[in-house]
Amino acid sequence: MTALRSILGDLARSPAAEGLDRSLSCRLTDLDEVVLGRLSSGAVRDLHVLPHGPAVPKADIRLTMNSDDLVAMVAGDLHFGQAWASGRVKLEAGLRDLLRLRKLL
């Protein structure tokens, strides 16, 4: 959770995310868990973990990665843009959100 808070905090503080109020999820494939939260007012709030499955609500902005890649991004060993371009990290969102968030890549 600490690593995820770091990555999502960077996302929330980015000028590209300014003014966004969206639900957010991060699926950690190797742990078979989904972390849900809310991106609003320059922060990520209400993070909680659910087991991956059909009962997980679909968030506006969805990240998918494994926990090793998450830790590598926090440590600075893996850049988000490189991880996304290579398919190690998936980012799904509506077209408007993707256009705003592309500056992060």
Image: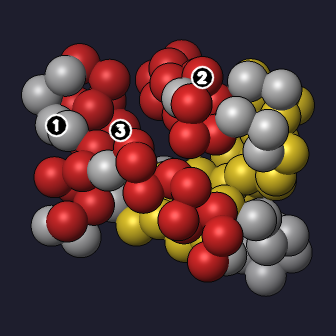
Specify whether 23 is left or right of 33: right
Which residue is nearer to you in this view: 22 or 89? 22
Q: CA distance from mark 1 to mark 2?
A: 19 Å
- Mark nearest the camera among 1 and 3 is 1
User: Which residue is disc 1 drawn over?
Assistant: 78
Specify whether 82 is left or right of 66: left
User: Which residue is disc 3 drawn over?
Assistant: 70
Quadrant, the N terminus: top right
Q: Of the numbered discs in the image, which one, if any, rests on residue 69?
A: none
User: Which residue is disc 2 drawn over?
Assistant: 13
SS at badge 3: helix
Q: Are marks 1 and 3 in contact (CB under 8 Å)?
A: no
Question: Where does residue 104 sit, x and y in percent of width and height?
Answer: 39, 44
Residue drawn at 12 percent across, 28 percent down: 77
Does label 1 or label 3 sit earlier along the sequence?
A: 3
Q: Is residue 62 visible?
A: no
Relative to 9, does residue 52 appear above or below in the rendering?
below
Tag 3: residue type?
Leu
SS at badge 2: helix
Image-quadrant location for residue 37: top right
- Mark nearest the camera among 1 and 2 is 2
